[in-house]
Amino acid sequence: MHNRHTSRHGRPNPREEFARHHPGRGRGRGRGGPRARRGDVRAAVLALLAERPMHGYEMIKEVEERTSGAWTPSAGSIYPTLQMLEEADLIRGEESDGKRRFSLTEAGVAEQQASAGEETPWDAVRAGADPESIRLRDAVVKLNHTFGQVFHAGDDDQQRRVRELLDETRRKVYSILSEEG
């Protein structure tokens, strides 16, 4: 019998199994946390461009930085929003140094001025995020970047010592989680 947790060959669907055993890591969750509504992306783009012209990737990184990693909009949300705003004549894109930089049009400036004083999209995201969760996520991201260095520059002995440290750290994390809270 085929169900949603098995493949058509009767074996567990790895993606579904992973999602079941890792809450919050399955469907409906983008990189960097819960998905923001399209309106949030639109508001973020307009707010950023009110400060200075930017290209799409720059906007993604800026939002990620301003939310301390709680929200990293995907290219799949930023670029369609840029196209929609350009078609609505709220922004204009111009080629510069091989990149397409966007800036507000007069209509875009007027819309931004009308929403002046409202909470920015990144402040709204940060207000709902647990600060300790943000710090923990940041620490994990930084640690993950170090693994590239271990594989790239570490000799066999250094890699062995890092593996032993990780094994010990994993045991300590489970020990913390088993404590009465």
Image (cartoon, rainbow, N blue to C red):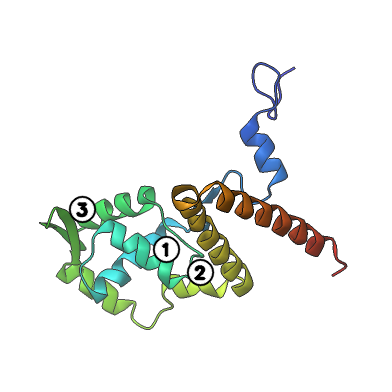
User: Rounded to the nearest whole Å, what is the CA distance between mark 3 and mark 1?
Assistant: 18 Å
User: Rounded to the nearest whole Å, what is the CA distance between mark 2 and mark 1?
Assistant: 9 Å
Q: Position of residue 65 (x, y in %)?
A: 41, 69
Q: Position of residue 31 (x, y in %)?
A: 49, 53
Q: Are circles 2 and 1 on residues that touch, CB within 8 Å?
A: yes
Of badges 2 and 1, nearer the viewer stands 2
Q: Which residue is disc 1 drawn over?
A: 40
Q: Are circles 3 and 2 on residues that touch, CB within 8 Å?
A: no
The crowd level at tag 1 (other Cα within 10 Å; few <14, some 14-19, many 20+) is some
- The numbered mark, 2 or 1, whose residue comes first in the sequence reads 1
**How many marks do you count on the picture?**
3
Q: Nearer the viewer, residue 102 or 166?
A: 166
* Residue sitting at x 38%, y 83%: 117
Is residue 151 placed above or below 37 in the rendered structure?
above
Quadrant the C terminus occupies: bottom right
Q: Which structural element holds mark 1?
A: helix
Of badges 3 and 1, nearer the viewer stands 1
- The numbered mark, 3 or 2, whose residue comes first in the sequence reads 3
Q: Which residue is disc 2 drawn over?
A: 125
* Direction from residue 153 to residue 173 in the image, left or right: right
Q: Nearer the viewer, residue 3 or 32?
A: 32
User: Which dot marks residue 177?
Assistant: none
Q: Please state which amino acid type lies under the numbered disc 3.
A: Glu
Q: Position of residue 103 (x, y in %)?
A: 19, 66
Q: Which residue is disc 3 drawn over?
A: 87
Of badges 3 and 2, nearer the viewer stands 2
